[in-house]
Image (spheres, rainbow, N blue to C red):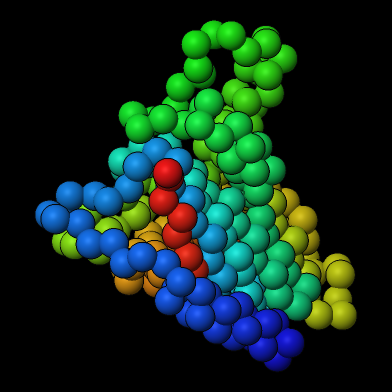
């Protein structure tokens, strides 16, 4: 209940913040995204087939566009005796700090070559971490796109309540996930229901997650 209450508060903050932003309306069905566009969202989630059966959870997701169609994502979902997250949570903030020197109108670039080799390798490592969770955005009509995604190095922590020797589920492991997200934009407020399939690399047990992300997008200036 505490998790759901926190999610509700976050959603209310997002809704109130929406009124502070200019309404943006594209002229055609083409994608509205540019390299450097960033969004952050919170979600209530339903986890299916965990060691505790079906259970509620809460999540937070960051998304950064590398071009008109591709974005890299970092997310964390947490519930009772359950959590999953990917290395994009580390890589995305590094890319954002790099700012305009890395992200231009046409996508990723490494500037004019003036940066040091250390900075270059550091930024390259951040991008590699973030590509662990990548989405492709298919424009459907004005203010709406569909984004299938794949995550290949997600860390998952999942135990049965009060029982840490479950013979079927591996408690901590890397896992694979693939899903699809529908993104509806209302100005800079975004509503994104999603559904995904996931499987652990050790126990090979399939699971399913569904939820609705609600958040704010910040276009590249």
Give me the residue at 49% from left, 69% from top: 215
Asked whether the viewer can see residue 201, the reply is: no
Viewer-nearest residue: 82 or 107: 107
120 to 48, vertically: above or below: above
Task: Point out the image quarter for the N terminus.
Answer: bottom right
Residue 55 rendering spot, x and y as whole percentages: 63, 82
Task: Point out the image quarter for the C terminus.
Answer: top left
Give me the residue at 63% from left, 75% from top: 58
164 to 8, vertically: above or below: above
Residue 139 rendering spot, x and y as whole percentages: 22, 54
Give me the residue at 32% from left, 47% from top: 33
Viewer-nearest residue: 155 or 173: 155
Position of 171 with respect to 27 (left or right) is: right
Give me the residue at 86% from left, 68% from top: 165
179 to 124, vertically: above or below: below
Residue 151 rendering spot, x and y as whole percentages: 52, 47
Position of 143 with respect to 51 (left or right) is: left
The furthest residue to the bottom: 1
Asked whether the viewer can see residue 8, the reply is: yes
């Amino acid at each position: 209940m505490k998790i759901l209450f926190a999610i509700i508060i976050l959603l209310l903050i997002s809704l109130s913040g929406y009124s502070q932003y200019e309404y943006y309306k594209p002229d055609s069905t083409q994608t509205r995204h540019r390299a450097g566009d960033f969004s952050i969202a919170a979600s209530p989630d339903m986890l299916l087939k965990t060691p505790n059966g079906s259970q509620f959870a809460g999540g937070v997701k960051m998304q950064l566009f590398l071009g008109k169609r591709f974005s890299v994502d970092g997310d964390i979902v947490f519930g009772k005796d359950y959590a999953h997250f990917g290395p994009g949570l580390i890589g995305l903030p590094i890319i954002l700090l790099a700012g305009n020197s890395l992200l231009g109108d046409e996508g990723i670039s490494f500037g004019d070559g003036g940066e040091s080799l250390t900075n270059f390798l550091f930024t390259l490592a951040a991008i590699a971490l973030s590509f662990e969770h990548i989405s492709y955005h298919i424009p459907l009509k004005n203010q709406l796109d569909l984004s299938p995604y794949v995550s290949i190095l997600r860390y998952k922590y999942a135990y049965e309540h009060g029982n840490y020797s479950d013979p079927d589920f591996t408690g901590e492991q890397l896992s694979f996930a693939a899903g699809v997200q529908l993104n509806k934009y209302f100005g800079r407020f975004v509503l994104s229901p999603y559904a995904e399939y996931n499987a652990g690399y050790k126990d090979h047990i399939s699971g399913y997650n569904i939820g609705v992300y609600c958040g704010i997008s910040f276009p590249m200036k």
